[in-house]
Amino acid sequence: MSTFPNSPRLLKGGIVLVEPDTGAVLRVITLQYNPDTLSRGLQIKALGEGGDRSDALRLTGPPVETIKLEAELDATDQLEFPEQNPAAAQTGIHPQLAALETVVYPASGHLQSNNSLSRSGTLEIIPMQTPLTLFIWSKNRILPVRLTDLSFTEEAFDPALNPIRAKVSIGMRVLSVDDLGFDHKGGSLFMAYLQQKESLAARGPGVTLAALGVNRIL
């Protein structure tokens, strides 16, 4: 029993894979431990310098948002009770690593199918479509993303050389309506994310010019 039964339940961040046409959830990957920091960057889309003066304040679309986080995986505690955690005892954290890695791999069945088409003389092979990847960091941040960087540092191994502790670095690029369109399910999720951001901004404390030491600007 928890020492603090009335403490709030800790939500986990994670990645969800969704079938892009039907919206069916294919896989849920949670972070074992939420990272202490989450780095985000916004690359603004605006008309370049040297253009018409009337365009100086115009944006050409949503900014390109990137996200970076460092996560940890650790099966040490599970290995203390191998009879209760047979998967960890047999394979360590291989399953958790593989779940993340296969997000950026095309399915083996698709590779084999394309190889068969190529051997049969098919001139044009359509690139494989992956599931829609969502990064979820609370109900306020449900983002369609593309993983741009994924690296692992395996730090400890069991006697069979199964990794039992690792650090994972994940880089993501948020996909906006510029990438997916308004009719795509991912585009709808991006618009909901943007509208939620606007709603949160409106709830911020009101501040007057006096806080900046001025009474008027124009």
Image (tube, rainbow, N blue to C red):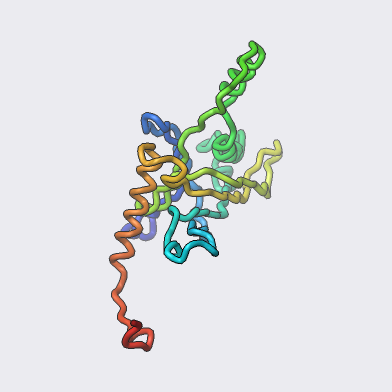
Check the picture and name the quadrant holding the C terminus: bottom left
Relative side of 81 to 21, left or right = right
Depth order, front residue of 158/58 = 58
Q: Residue at x 29, y 75 (%)?
A: 206
- The answer to which image quadrant residue 96 occupies is top right
Which residue is at the far top?
Answer: 120
Nearest the camera: 155 or 104?
104
40 left or right, relative to 188: right
What residue is at 61 percent from the left and 37 percent from the top? 94
Position of 202 compared to 121: left or right?
Answer: left
Q: Which percent across, then down, holds residue 57?
A: 42, 65
Residue 142 visible at all: yes
Say above or below: 118 vs 97.
Answer: above
Image spot of residue 204 (x, y percent): 31, 69
Which residue is at 49% across, 56% downward? 45
The location of residue 86, given as percent across then percent down, is 55, 34
Toward the viewer: 84 or 203? 203
Q: How many marks?
A: 0
- Residue 143 higher or lower than 82, as above or below: below
Q: In this view, which residue lies farthest toward the front? A: 52
Residue at left offset 70%, top offset 36%: 160
Horizontal placement of 10 versus 100: left or right?
left
Q: Is residue 95 visible?
A: no
**Residue 152 x/y as whole percent:** 64, 47
